Amino acid sequence: MPARARVVIIGGGVGGASVAFHLAELGETDVVLLERDELTSGSTFHSAGLVGQLRADPTLTRMNMHSVALYRRLEQTDHPPGWVEAGGIKLASSPERLAEIRRQISWART
């Protein structure tokens, strides 16, 4: 391991691995990712891996939509993560909940 790097990422979960991936895509070559165990063996490993795209605010909705696009791309690489796009369903049990879901859908469409 090098003694120095321009970028040091601490944590090899989905967040740290994503940062390293995106930096590499941008052409950054002086990156070190530090992980105490195997990559994605901590919280990421125990996660259900759900990536619902409709969220309570527009920023989270856009972030999850970006994640879905990224996972689709990664599935086409030499090392696919094994992500399966299964879909989901949201049920509105009240007029207020229906209005909230419609708001979330509008964020996803913009």
Image (spheres, rainbow, N blue to C red):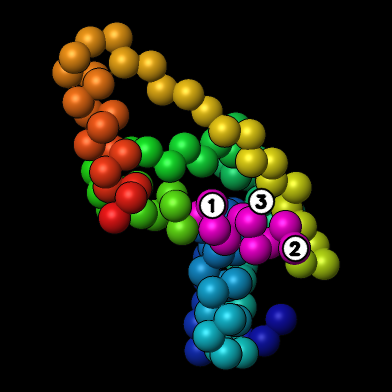
| Quarter occupied by residue 20 | bottom right
CA distance for labels 2 and 3: 20 Å
Q: What residue type is labelled 2?
A: Gln
**Within the magenta stretch, is there residue 73?**
yes
> Is 103 situated left or right of 88 in this image?
left
List the residue tagged with mark 3: 40
Q: How crowded is mark 3: few (under 14 residues within 10 Å), some or many (20 or more)?
A: some
Residue 84, horizontal then vertical, whole percent: 69, 41
- Residue 12 placement: quadrant: bottom right
Q: What residue lies at 27% left-to-right and 47% top-to-bottom?
A: 107
Residue at 64% of width from left, 41% of height from top? Answer: 85
| Residue 74 versus residue 94 in the image, above or below | below
- The answer to whether the residue labelled 3 contacts the one labelled 1, judged by CB atoms less than 8 Å apart, is no
Residue matched to label 1: 68
Query: Which callout, 2 or 3, points at the residue further toward the start of the chain?
Result: 3
Q: Mark 2 points at which residue?
A: 76
**Range of magenta residues:** 67-76
Please tell me which residue is depicted at 61% across the width and 67% down the height of the picture.
34
- Magenta stretch mostly in which secondary structure? helix
Question: Amino acid type of disc 1?
Answer: Val
Q: Report if residue 11 is visible in the image.
A: no
Q: Give the class, few, some or many, for how many residues have Cα within 10 Å of label 1's Cα (few <14, many ≥20).
A: some
